[in-house]
Image (spheres, rainbow, N blue to C red):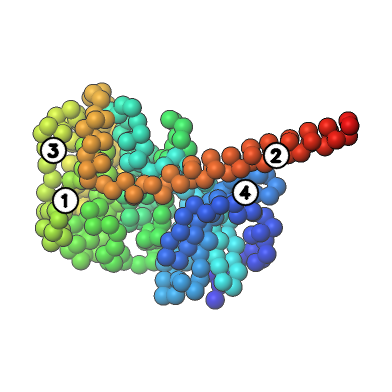
Amino acid sequence: MPFIKDRQKAEDISAVYELKEKLGEGSFSEVWVAQHRHSQRLVAVKCIHKRALKGKEALLENEIAVLRKVHHENIVSLEETFETPAKLYLVMPLVTGGELLGRILERGSYAENDARPVIQQVLDAVRYLHQLGIVHRDLKPENLLYESPREDSRILISDFGLSKMEEQGVLSTACGTPAYVAPEFLQQKTYGREVDLWAIGVISYILLCGYPPFYHDNDTQLYRQIVEAEHEFDSPYWDSISESAKDFISHLLQKDPDTRYNCEQALQHTWISGGEVLERNIHSSVSEQIQENFARSQWKRAFNAIVVLRRLSNKARDAEDEEEKEDRATAEGETR
């Protein structure tokens, strides 16, 4: 059974794109850097083995449906799809800027004012999703990518594998990553778009101190903390952070989803809308905590794109050098 009703012909993928080098692979898919044969533009192609998807077809169909619906500058887009009897190909922009936490580690300095525009962009994109009736359900730092290595690069929301359209019915399935799920998830209640705002609160907290607001080696204790919304702004880690930022986070990490900020309220909060923030350099403290609390392997995948691009660039340069040598040799032969 085909996944894409208006799919392009099976042979079109190789006619349109040349798969250059593998970026990474998962249990049922591979991601390749590919080059458009006409424009020479580099893209990322997710190659999915349909046989390995057995039993998970609905998740992929849902992800594709969502990606086809969204068009926002802060969301990774789906550009084209190709399908053969054995494989499904999703063509997306090549994102090379790395994951959010990895980028912080690479910085020379980092202040509250650097975290604010990241959260502002995420809020703007999530507001757009919610206006379309889409709940992401898996917002976390690993799913926030920088478009390019440029300092002014946009942040992009990725991975819509767990996203859901509200028109599909009541949301009640517990899913996502434990440290970022809202209390209503764990209480086995029906829930809505408010779960995304809780996750943004957790992300905001991490960006300003380097560790999560809820943490325990024992899952039962972790879930109890989340259900009770028990979080603190510990000294000395939060001494250099403004009261405005703490107030913003507290309005997102509300136990009751009815009192939790929505996107509009969050965007209008003074910490986001341009109020005064502390400009102290918190890079040393935050990066130390990130390294201690988050495995670096989480964002190594995102840097693979940069490594592969360099490798492809080197190959192209080597090929040009070889061509020049051959041309010189030919010219010398003709002279003789």
Mark nearer the viewer, 4 or 3: 4
Sequence-earlier tag: 3 or 2: 3
Q: Quick one: SS at disc 1?
A: loop
Residue 233 is marked as 3
Residue tagged 2: 322
Q: Are marks 4 and 3 in contact (CB under 8 Å)?
A: no
Amino acid identity at mark 1:
Tyr
Local crowd size for mark 4, using a 10 Å CA cut-off: few (<14), some (14–19), many (≥20): some
Distance between the alpha carbons at the discs numbered 1 and 4: 43 Å
Residue tagged 1: 215
Q: Say which quadrant the N terminus sits in.
A: bottom right
Vertical placement of 217 versus 38: above or below? Answer: below
Horizontal side of residue 125 vs 276, given as left or right: right
Residue 35 is marked as 4
Q: Quadrant of residue 292?
A: top left
Residue depicted at 50% across the width and 56% down the height: 31
Distance between the alpha carbons at the discs numbered 1 and 3: 14 Å
